[in-house]
């Protein structure tokens, strides 16, 4: 299946893209996607942790992704 990935902040620099189409196996969870991204883009493992939003809503690790989902990779944010 195909999803669209959007990268924000430092994730854009680490991956070298701000968006891309990405192929996954059916029934892939958010947790499995994170693991795949770290394998494919090893620089992402240098981020403390990153959040995932699916179709503009923050997603838990057990959410199963669907065809044509829009998945945002959101790095940790700090500030005051």
Image: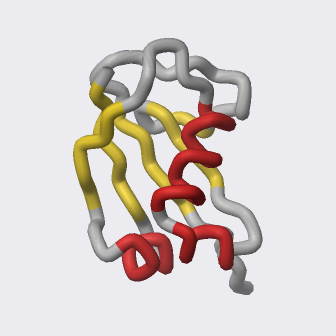
Residue 12, position in %: x, y? 38, 73
- Quadrant of the drawing holding the N terminus: top left
- 51, 29: nearer the viewer: 29
Q: Is residue 37 left or right of residue 58?
A: left
Examine the image and state in which quarter residue 69 appears: top left
As drawn, 24 above or below 80 = above
- 68, 37: nearer the viewer: 37
Residue displayed at 72% across by 33% down: 61
Examine the image and state in which quarter residue 18 appears: bottom left
Residue displayed at 45% across by 38% down: 56
Residue 78, position in %: x, y? 71, 79
As drawn, 59 above or below 78 = above
- 69, 45: nearer the viewer: 45
Residue displayed at 56% across by 57% down: 39
Examine the image and state in which quarter residue 47 appears: bottom right
Residue 58, position in %: x, y? 60, 39
Q: Is residue 36 left or right of residue 55?
A: right
Q: Is residue 52 left or right of residue 68?
A: right
As drawn, 63 above or below 13 = above
Residue 73, position in %: x, y? 50, 55
- Quadrant of the drawing holding the C terminus: bottom right
């Amino acid at each position: 299946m195909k999803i669209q990935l959007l990268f924000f902040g430092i994730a854009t620099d680490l991956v070298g893209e701000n968006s891309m189409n990405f192929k996954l196996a059916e029934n892939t969870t958010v947790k499995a996607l994170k693991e795949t991204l770290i394998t494919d883009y090893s620089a992402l493992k240098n981020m403390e942790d990153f959040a995932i939003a699916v179709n503009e809503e923050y997603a838990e690790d057990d959410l199963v992704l669907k065809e044509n989902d829009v998945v945002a990779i959101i790095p940790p944010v700090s500030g005051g």
